[in-house]
Image (cartoon, rainbow, N blue to C red):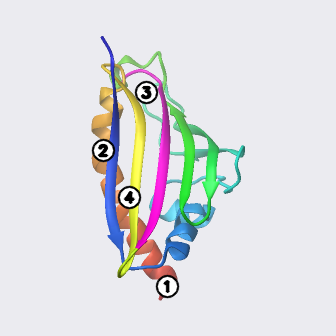
Amino acid sequence: MSETHAITVEKVLPYPAERIWRTLTTSGEIAKWLMPNDFTAEVGRRFTFRTAPMGDWDGVVHCEVLDCDPPRLLRYSWTGGSDSNPAYGSKLHSMVTWTLTPVEGGTHLRFVHDGFVFPGNRFAFDAMGPGWGRAHDSIARVTAERVA
């Protein structure tokens, strides 16, 4: 029996939503806190993230922008991995959602990476969970550099 799981990370950043939005949606800024990419914030746009290959996976994450409501909501598909790479689990077909909500003193940033099917995606879930937490710290750093 398979179960679906999600990684959720939430953090309040001391910046307006518009500034954080730029960090989340500008290709060069995304490369500073996540991976090289060819991202454009428009619904239907297909883009990729690129990282080091792992086993027989080429290191490319294939994505498509599914929802874009600046500066409040960004959602995209996330597909990566390989079904023939048993050491690292099966291919991941998932979705990433960023929600920005103004709060006193800044913006509440909520991230959900949903669609990890266990047991096949357990390796990816375990590896990516801590990584997304660190990514939020990097988003804060990149946004602060942009503000300064």
Camera-nearest residue between 144 and 28: 144
What separation in Å lies between label 3 and label 4 (alpha carbons)?
A: 24 Å
Locate the N terminus and report the quarter of the image it occupies. Answer: top left
Q: Is residue 94 on the magenta stretch?
A: yes
Give whichever of discs 3 and 4 has the lower sequence position.
3
Q: Name the residue under label 2.
A: 129
Kindly identify the residue that appears in the image at 27 percent across and 49 percent down.
130
Q: Which amino acid does label 2 sit on?
A: Gly
Q: What element carries label 1?
A: helix
In the image, residue 86 lies at what x, y percent? 37, 17
Q: Mark 1 points at which residue?
A: 147
Span of residues in magenta: 89-102
Q: What residue type is labelled 1?
A: Val
Q: In this view, does 79 lie above or below 9?
A: above
As measured in the structure, the alpha-carbon distance from the residue carrying label 1 to the one carrying label 2 is 28 Å
Q: Residues within 10 Å of mark 2 (few under 14, many from 20)?
A: some
Real-space Cα separation, disc 1 to disc 4, in angstroms: 18 Å
Q: Where is residue 26 in the image (x, y as percent from the top left)?
A: 61, 65
Kind of residue sitting beneath label 3 = Gly
Residue wearing tag 4: 135
Outermost top residue: 1
- Indicate which disc residue 55 carries: 3
